[in-house]
Amino acid sequence: MNFKNRNKNHSVVRSLMFCMLAFLAACGTKNRTIALVPEATFSLNGTWKFNTIYGQGYNYMNVTKSSSDIVIDNSDKDKVEIKGNKWIVKKEAAKDYPFQGNDFLIRNFGQGEHKENYVRFHPKLKKSGYYEAFITHPYASHSKPLYTVKHKKGATTKKVSSRTYCGEWISLGIFQFDKEDDNYIEITAATEGQVPVDAVMFQPISKEIYEEAQALPNQIFLPAHDDSKWHDLQVPGHWGMINSYSNYTGTGWYRKTFELPSHWSQQENERIRIQFGAVYHLAKVYLNGTLVGEHRGGLTPFELDITNVVKFGEKNVVAVEANNDFIVGATWNWGGIIRDVTIKKDNEVRIQHQYIHADPDLEKGTATVSLKIKLENNSAKVKKVDVFANIKEISGVTLSQKEVEVAANSIKTIVLKGKLEHVKLWHFDDPNLYTLQTTIADETGGLDSQVDNFGIRKIELTKSQMLLNGEPIRTGGFNRVSENRYFGSSEPLEILERDVDLMKASGANFMRIMHGTQNEKLIELCDKKGILLFEEVNVRHLENAEFTAPEYPLIKQWTTEMIERDANHPSIIGWSVGNELKHHYDYAKMMIEYVKTELDAHRLVTCVSNSGQKPAYTPETDPNTHVDLIMHNMYRWQGKPQEILNTLREKWPNKPIFISEYGFDPYPTASLDGDKPIVSEWNNHYRGKNEFVIGTSMWTFNDYRSGYGGTSAEENRVWGVINVWGQKRRLFERFQKENSPVEVLALGEVDLAKKSTTIKVKTKDLSNYPSYTLTNYKLAYTFYSESGEVLFQKNVGLPTLKPGASWEGTIDWDEFKNPYLLKVSLINPLGYERAKKEVFFKLPTTPEIQEIVAGKEGVRVYFDKAYGVKEYKVAYTTLDGKMHYSAPTISDFVEINTEKKQVKEVALIAINGKGESQASETSIVKGSSKKLPPVIWESFIKHNKLVIGYSSDFEDEVYTVYYGTNPEELTKKKTSNVRGMMTIDLADGDQPAYVKIQRRINGKWSALSPVFKINQ
């Protein structure tokens, strides 16, 4: 199913929607004008109803054992049947995950070994009945072990990753069991990998609950079904926005009642379609009780024709069955309708897709443009249409073809060509965009229009370089995991804008944007802000049961859906057909050819690898031989970086290399003080050497939620330059320096009385990293007061500076009094800082401690951060009279680990580039036997919910949040066991302004946090 996503630049579309634009037909049509056909759309975004059916999924956070449950451990020999050899008993689990009893079983499976090698748990029931079946396991490497439940109605199989939700009870569903039958749960593996076996549990349920659960799937999508008591849930969104579904895996049901716009009417020559930006991961869509279509794949768009089912002038009920069982790698399986839902009305003849390719002549300043258009005829008759296209920003150029004949119920592709004069190129420092507008018409007038932005830029590769518009560049960026801790993978525009701005501010210009089709709004922002991207289809395991070798039709579908949606974005310079695959030579070769011949002949194509350095992978057996450039994920476990690079270069000497991932161990805590000096060490491998490495992409830009083994108690992978709430770590400033194209930004002596000083700029040379030409850059210099008030400001334009170039000049200023800080910045044409120099004239003002919270394991000192302070530290004395200093922090609190030494007094010190402030007044610390409370990272109100992000420990049982409008009396509260984040439904008109939190460990409550103001 193809998704027609038109009018991608929504701000442009709104301004054009009802504007009549004339198109002159070039092929003999005399003075004929065709209007841009307005797009008829109706958004179904907003509040939907959501619910689940018992047994179709589970939230492991809410599973508890009781005395009536039947629990069978692997060591229960009379109830456990072990088939085959090589099963090993282990007493220590990888990644320190808990397991039942004193040990567990584990086995390494090879291909085809599952029939003769398994473990079966037999409950030997004393009475027949209904049970929910659970399994639990420690960590192992297999992504999809096979679980089979033998029950009264037959056998039900399910695949569950051994890498996720380790140590938790995972539901396999609800079943009827007859005590006379041979009931069991069998664990094996149909593909190679390591499988753990620990314990199972049979939890009794009532006959009434079971029978209702069996009946509901056939009723829940019917219009008459009562959804009045269902949850309200935002679309786009995910069901984890509801506390009780924060960790839910399985099937969820959505319903929405709507009416089509009153001015729409049923027309014989029109089609109505419902379009989904993405539903994770499986979707069935019902309208007015009728199944109108299905889609498999949680990150790509799809559309369904509902012409014969939708009602005009009446209420319609759409129901969506979504399933997030498929868990990929280390990222979270955000479940539900995660992107926009739209109903569109089209003529039966429409532009299904248009592909724009502009090839510039760099010497002449011209470009040839090729426009490939797919015309779709959904009628039973042959149709003839005229096609007209022009570029809004370039007058006098019309691409057209008259009387294109499209057969009944078919798609026809045509190609229009033209030449553009005096074009402006797209560059990451100057991302110029054009708008192409295409309309089709017949004798009655306009039938359909499509509007797309595009850019004109030239990407070329040599054996050692990548050239952008003829210039060799070396630059890099990040892998950004497409999610937010509250919004999940349904990120709204404000989150995407924030992160793209942060990435650009950190110096990112070129990156592999993570495995998986991205939110199109993110790619639009990269078009506008200037980031070169490789986008990747969501393929990480070829052994995934969804995929059918050797043709892989589902992967081809996902790739088509991704490329047809995104092929006109100038930020995307290439596609990847997979990530870190095994035994993938034939697959990658086939898919690379498929992309180039069927979908996009002009962009680069690759397959991201982490195995090319291994002896077993040779030019004859590794698809690096067929990629346009090598994209390699390089981690320390592979060996020394230089040895890896040498090996790759020796095997494929004629291909440049992009380090598509490099990363290091996660931070020990979620602290904002996390830094990785090793980043600078690794970047030294590209400075003045290994020039065939054209760029790098750090894993990861952001922390991300995960159920993967080794995840923090907050359920986050703590790897990022920013945390899950978008707050910068120390590593952010390191990347600003590492990603700068400037080698030297130096000031002469700053004597305020002389009113001027010298300045020098030197760019990194071509062999350095990163390196590229600086065009239309400027120097901005500003004097600030202690409060951040601007005292004097001026800009100086710079000449074009090629790699290795130097510029020297003078900056001057007027007379003013008592400056605190001079900041000199090198600014690119988009306003992003690429280098800076700061001169402090004063020490920071003495800071103040706002509140001290003491616990038996430490002391937390809170304060308000002041302008122009780089970091803070605490001086403290212990009962033995000794003075100590905490490590400096960029956060708004300092936590002192007392290590069995009780803190007596504390004082706060602020630090800037000139030195340290005087210490604040000393505060006495009152001892406490309670644990410290959680740290509140973020709090805000969205969708009529209070959202609180906080720290967690594995020992935490529950959290209680107190909130209200008066900081002295927070009278409302909510308790939840959800780690890392809580949402609280607010009553209409309820707008709390303050919040505090505490946690319970082993039945005892921690201290209360300070009161924080909720971000508005």
Image: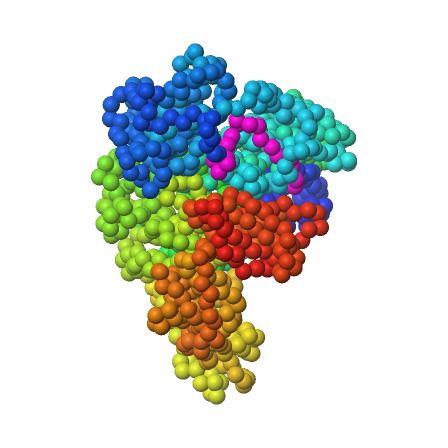
Residue 559: x and y in percent read 46, 35
Q: Position of residue 944 (x, y in %)?
A: 65, 47
Residue sitting at 43 percent across and 18 percent down? Answer: 125
The picture quadrant where one finds residue 290 is top right
Residue 412 occupies which quadrant of the picture?
Answer: top right
Q: Quadrant of residue 542?
A: top left
Q: Which is nearer the eye, 474 or 188? A: 188
Any magenta on residue 60? yes
**Quarter the N terminus occupies:** top right
- In this view, the residue in front, 340 or 956, is 956
Please name the residue shown 40% across and 80% down the image. 748
Residue 254, x across and y down, in percent: 61, 32
The residue under the point 23% across, 36% down is: 616
Say above or below: 600 vs 199: below
| Quarter of the rendering occupied by the C terminus | bottom right
Residue 103 visible, this angle: yes
- Judge from the rendering whether residue 406 lies leftward or rightward of residue 103; answer left or right: right
Q: Which residues are magenta?
A: 45-62
Position of residue 96 measured from the top left corner of the image (x, y, whole percent): 33, 42
Q: Residue at x 47, y 85 (%)?
A: 752
Q: Residue furthest top?
A: 180
Residue 186 in magenta stretch: no
